[in-house]
Image (cartoon, helix red, strand yellow):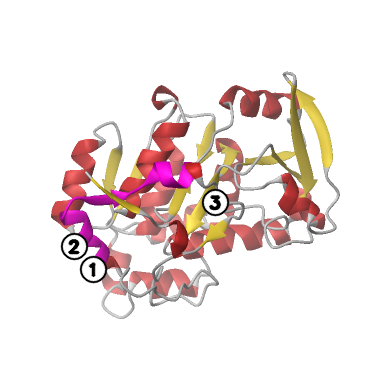
Amino acid sequence: MQLEGYLESLYRHFPKGLLQTYIIYKVDLFDSEYSQLFQKYPDCIVIEETGFHDDFVALIDRLETKYILFGTDDVVYFDSVDFGIIDQTFGAFPDDIFGFSLRLSLDYVKSGSDVVEEFTVAGQAVYRINWKKGKLPNTKYPFELDSTVYQTDLVRKVVKKVAKDYPILKKLFNPTSLHVKLLKRIISMKNFLVSIDTFFNPNTLESYCYRWCRNHKGKVPSYIYFQKICSTAIQINTVNTFSNEKNFIRPVKGKSVIELNEKYRSGLRLDIEAIEKNKPRATHVGSEYFKLKRL
């Protein structure tokens, strides 16, 4: 239900021909419902997860697009920005732009003490803040897995550092190597990735990339640009039960993944139009925005 809400809202607010969507999907619960969803969005390229770390690095390596927009399934788009403006902003400020955010608003940024600069791009107002001097949680957080457009080359650079993408490690820990087959007898791949201080799931991907950028400020651009808030994360259930990362969400009664799947099977879907009519003003909201409609 949440992934369908994300995809429906994404394609409502971005031209379908502009996007190539990849979904790294772990075959686990609700396979029949996911199959139903993937049939509805046949243009999406679905990658069955065998190991998140390797699957993600391989995907990033093969992308041919100029930009990357990450997405997670608790996010909903309720407004849009002309992508031409985003592209022109990257072109106008190639040396200092880290990303173009779709989750920041002028009101939010001004609620703190961040310095906001205004520019005109193609006749429209565009704003920027220096994330290296950010004062608010979202203005000092440069790398995140939803609602910011990044240049693919920059993402590759950061991920390569975080993935410990060194030739010797690639050779030693190729999934088909004898070394790995023997290693798996004494340690899980997840624990091995932890031991060499790299990511093994989406949460750790974001946190490791964020920390690398914070710790290597001189190696990445300083500014996040934005126009207005266009998306929000509706937080209603637990992200996972094995991570100590900050996005551990206390479940809302009646909205566990099991209960939502039953509602999905009965024909209920997230009501994107209701969210568009009552636009959120924050990057994260609660269950009051999780309205359902029947097909």
**Occupied quadrant, residue 173:** bottom left
Q: Which residue is mark 1?
A: 258
Q: Which residue is mark 2?
A: 262
Residue at image position (86%, 49%) is 115
Write down the region rendered in magenta: 259-276
Q: Position of residue 209 (x, y in %)?
A: 59, 57
**Which secondary structure, mark 2?**
helix
Q: Main structural element of the magenta stretch: helix, strand or loop?
A: helix
Q: Give the camera-side residue of 76 and 208.
A: 76
Looking at the image, is mark 3 or mark 1 earlier in the sequence?
3
Q: Tag 1: Cα neighbours inside 10 Å, few (<14), some, or many (≥20)? A: few
Is 254 placed left or right of 135 in the picture? left
Q: Which residue is mark 3?
A: 159
Q: Position of residue 264 (x, y in %)?
A: 22, 55
Residue at image position (41%, 68%) is 239
Label 3 to label 2: alpha-carbon separation: 37 Å
Is 124 placed left or right of 9 in the picture? right
Q: Are marks 1 and 2 in contact (CB under 8 Å)?
A: yes
Residue at image position (45%, 56%) is 289
**Which secondary structure, mark 3?**
helix
In this rendering, the answer to whether 12 lies above or below 183 is above
The answer to whether any part of residue 243 appears in the image is: yes
Q: Amino acid at mark 3?
A: Val
Magenta residue check for 219:
no
Q: Amino acid at mark 1?
A: Ile
